[in-house]
Amino acid sequence: MKVGRLLLRAAVGGFFIGHGTQKLFGWFGGQGLKPSAEHFDGMGLKPGIVHATAAGVAETFGGAGVLLGYRTPLASASIVSVMLTAINRVHFKNGPWAHKGGYEYNVVLAAAAVSLAESGPGALSLDALRGKEKSGAIWGVFSLAAGVAGAAGAHFLAESRATPVVAAPESAPAAGSTNGTDPVGVVAPAETPAYAAPAEETAAEETSSETSEA
């Protein structure tokens, strides 16, 4: 089990270090912080720069803690927090299966982190060398609860910064139509004259004028 836990820590912790430094520094073919922040904005995690930085730091230091076996319960909680946030904001709507963009991979990684917190990092770890290795169900529950709290904090921060939906203003009533409440809401065209003389009156005036001139 000493070697088994070391291999699990190396795999989980190593890949999380890679993911975190991709976001923060653009290492390992990553985008770097600014494009990552824009991506987080697009997921509704605003302000994107805050969420991208927090995710990158949690993945980098959480991964390093798991890899080295240092403060393992806290390191595991960081990983759980990031995975729950990813499930909530990206993968849950796609169902469980990874080939459809689902959350199965995230669940496996979160479960591995909680398992390491419960079992302890093992003899081949910094916690063991310092004489401060922690293990037991209480530490597994702690890492899970702290991860849930971190993910909840990220969610509520994003929701508090969400742009409110503003209803489109009602259009003004068109000319010649009513406004829905006042049946006299008719607008006369501006070019319509106030009075137009009948054709008979106009003809009579012209005849009278010609007679008087004669």
Image (spheres, helix red, strand yellow):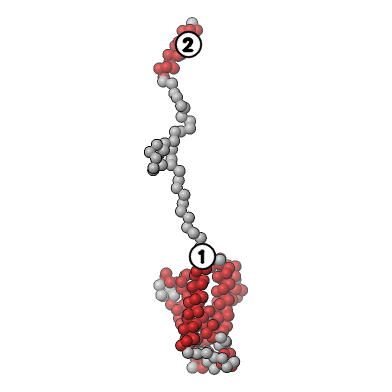
Q: Position of residue 201 (x, y in %)?
A: 42, 17
| Image height of 124 relative to 186, above or below | below
Residue underneath mark 2 = 209
Closer to us: 96 or 208: 208
Mark 1 or mark 2, whichever is nearer to me:
1
179 in relation to 109, above or below? above
x 50%, y 78%: residue? 147
Q: Label for residue 63?
A: none
Alpha carbon separation for disc pair 1 and 2: 81 Å
Q: Kindly indicate the quadrant of the structure image that contains residue 99.
A: bottom left
Q: Residue at x 57, y 83 (%)?
A: 64
Look at label 2 and name its amino acid.
Answer: Ser
How far across and how far down the image is residue 35, in percent?
Answer: 58, 67
Asked if the residues shown at circle 1 and circle 2 are in contact, with their CB atoms under 8 angstroms apart, the answer is no
SS state under label 2: helix
Query: What residue type is disc 1 on?
Result: Ser
Q: Residue at x 47, y 70 (%)?
A: 89
The correct choice, above or below, for 27 with respect to 2 in the image is above
Q: Which residue is mark 1?
A: 160
Give residue 2's position: percent from left, percent from top. 51, 93
* Label whose residue precedes the other's in the sequence (1 or 2): 1
